[in-house]
Amino acid sequence: QVRLHHSVPICCLPGCTFCSFAHMVCSRVGDGPLICTFLVPPVSYDYSWNMFRCIGDYLHLFGVIVVLGTLYKNKSCRGISRGTHILFLGVFASRYLDLFYYRQSQYLVVFKLTYMITACLVLAVFWKLDHTYERKKDTCSLMVLLMPCVAAALLLAQDYTIIEVMWSFSQFLEGVAMVPQYIFCYRGTGANDIGVALSVMSLGGYRLFYVANWVRKRVQSPEYFDAISWIGGFVEISFFFDYLLSIFTGASLLKSVVLKVDKKVIELPRGFLCLDVV
């Protein structure tokens, strides 16, 4: 026998993962009925309101808008990696599960929904302009990027709840989301298009402002520690700095490695590691 407070029609089996996700507390007194109380989702206060974080948010959004504008202007997907935008959609879909869990400020809700909607719009345009999509040049295997992110999230998540594991996964995935686009750029595809170049600079560089935000928070609050975000951010800006290095000096520490790994993966039997995902 189960009695629900507030008549909440949710599964209440002991140890149920969904009950944990839905923020319910289940208890039993002796041999009495299992009593499950639905708790009101708490307000999220962990957003860092400062100039660096806001600039990073708007620069990221600007980069996505430039991508959409470039696709519309050129009526072509030339020079743009679909794989990168699939990964960004994965980042948003896994990170923003908290929209169903926390009450949040209007700023956060608007930005999170905007990121998800624009990511879907970009992929919809790719579907519409499929005849212009450069499949043979967008060769980066998404599974090669996804698997380490899944493993890292399972190993390093601070708490094994759905939201925490998915949030950790999104941080690591964001760190490598631009790799397919960098492979495009390293090969010179679409390098002369100002829209492509501007979008790459925006989507690759916005994380620099998040790093400045982390440094500011660390200085103001020495107890602040967020290793998962820092690892993802370090990976992302490492690829971005290497990309800048290849543009301005012609030298690159990661370019040859990335292209060699990509070539080896392409040479694997068709279908291995789900290469057809893009």
Image: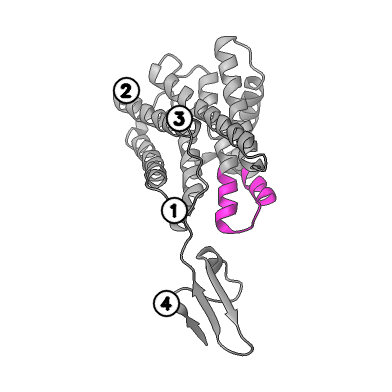
Q: Amino acid at mark 2?
A: Asn
Give residue 74's mark: 2
Q: Which residue occupies 56% across, 10% down? A: 248
- Front tag of 2 and 1: 1
Estimate how packed mark 1 is, as few (under 14), some (14 to 19) or many (20 or more) residues with alpha carbons within 10 Å: few
- Circle 2 SS class: helix
Residue at the extreme bottom: 31
| Residue bearing mark 3 | 55
Q: Which residue occupies 57% across, 42% down? A: 171
Estimate how packed mark 4 is, as few (under 14), some (14 to 19) or many (20 or more) residues with alpha carbons within 10 Å: few
Percent coordinates x, y for residue 110 in the rendering: 37, 44
| Residue bearing mark 1 | 99
Residue 86 visible at all: yes
Q: Are marks 3 and 1 in contact (CB under 8 Å)?
A: no
Q: Amino acid at mark 1?
A: Leu
Left or right side of 55 for 255: right
Q: Nearer the viewer, residue 159 or 173?
A: 159
Q: Earlier in the sequence, mark 2 or mark 1?
A: 2
- Circle 4 SS class: helix
| Residue bearing mark 4 | 6
